[in-house]
Image: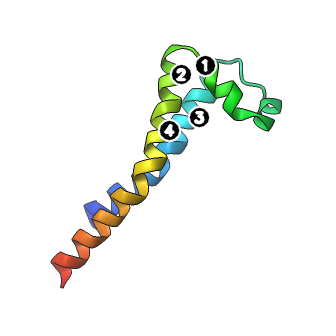
């Protein structure tokens, strides 16, 4: 596996790392709140809210990043 493939593999897990940071690091998360997670995440303070924003950004750009890496590998390989 090339370094580019590893970068895509790691990028796929970054949104979930940010989600876990936003939800579980404050100690006030109750699994019953999963029925309405957006309300819970909107009310988070400080760095936990920034972790939620990082999660949203990562979900938006991961597919574009993966496509760019795959195209770059294909063009160089051809």
Foreground: disc 3 or disc 4 = 4
Q: Which mark is residue 55?
A: 4
Residue at left offset 41%, top offset 53%: 62
Q: Quadrant of residue 73?
A: bottom left
State whether residue 1 appears in this view: no
In contact (CB < 8 Å): disc 1 and disc 2:
yes
Q: Look at mark 3 in the image and give the residue it sits on.
A: 20
Q: In this view, does 17 lie above or below 27?
A: below
Q: Distance between the residues labelled 1 and 4?
A: 14 Å
**Quadrant including the N terminus:** bottom left
* Residue sitting at the far right: 32
> Could you say whether the residue bearing mark 4 is in a helix, strand or loop?
helix
Q: Which residue is drawn at 31% across and 70% down?
A: 70
Q: Which residue, given by chain and number where applicable, does mark 1 sit on?
A: 44
Percent of width and height locating residue 39 = 70, 27
The residue that mark 2 highlights is 48
């Amino acid at each position: 596996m090339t370094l580019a493939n590893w970068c895509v593999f790691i990028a796929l897990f970054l949104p979930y790392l940010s989600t876990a940071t936003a939800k579980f690091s404050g100690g006030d998360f109750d699994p019953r709140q999963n029925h309405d997670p957006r309300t819970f995440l909107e009310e988070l303070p400080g760095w936990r809210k920034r972790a939620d924003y990082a999660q949203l950004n990562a979900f938006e750009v991961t597919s574009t990043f993966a496509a760019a890496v795959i195209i770059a590998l294909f063009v160089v390989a051809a």
